[in-house]
Amino acid sequence: MTDTVLPDVTVRPATAEDRPTVERLWLMFRHDLSAFRCVLPAPDGTFRDDRVESAFTRPGWAPYLFECGTHPAGFAFVRGLDGPVRVLNSFFVVRGVRRRHVGLQAVRAVLTRHPGPWEVAFQRDNPAAVAFWHRVASDLAGDAWTCELRPVPERPELPPDAWLSFRVEADVPPLP
């Protein structure tokens, strides 16, 4: 893959064979988030990975892997597939392909696979995340979305997360 040509983004359910790749991407994701949550890795250099375990093993969850050509480009974890509201639990795009619409293509592919009500949480002190998620909500739901602050469970010392709520229809048009 060159710096100027980006292959199409493929979004697919992650399999057990993909788990080691997703686990490595998870470390990058948690490292990125550490800038906003003041979280250090464990003594062995890892971060908590209970969401990875849940995404691959718990009912109502689904892991997705994003690829650009043969290169892993990110992942998403969805939960609540067995409930009334789906939650985009974790979403990550590798820095090397950010700002190239990879994230927009990937999130639309994941969310439109599961039409209905959605919630997405992000750190409001991350300006790039705020802009990205507001664009996603507007692209998918027009003006029919809300954003509210909610405390981070079991972490009262952290600022609250921003939570978007919107509905995704099955027939969302492709990106312009």
Image: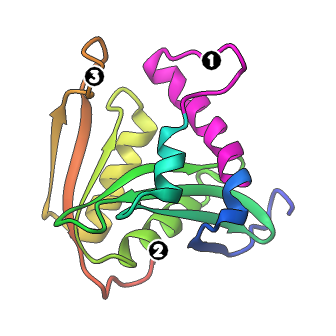
Residue designated by label 1: 42
Q: Quadrant of residue 135?
A: bottom left
Q: What residue type is labelled 2?
A: Ala
Q: Which amino acid does label 1 sit on?
A: Ala
Could you give the CA–CA distance between mark 2 and mark 3, rounded to whole angstroms? 31 Å
Q: Residue 56: where, in percent of width, then height?
A: 53, 58
- Image quadrant where one finds the C terminus: bottom left
Whether the residues at callouts 1 and 3 have beta carbons within 8 Å, the answer is no
What is the image's colouring? Answer: rainbow
Whether the residues at callouts 1 and 2 have beta carbons within 8 Å, the answer is no
- Image quadrant where one finds the N terminus: bottom right
Residue designated by label 2: 109
Q: Residue 99: where, in percent of width, then height?
A: 58, 52
Q: Give the range drawn in magenta.
A: 21-48
Which label belongs to residue 161? none
**How packed is label 3: few (under 14 Cα within 10 Å), some, or many (20 or more)?**
few
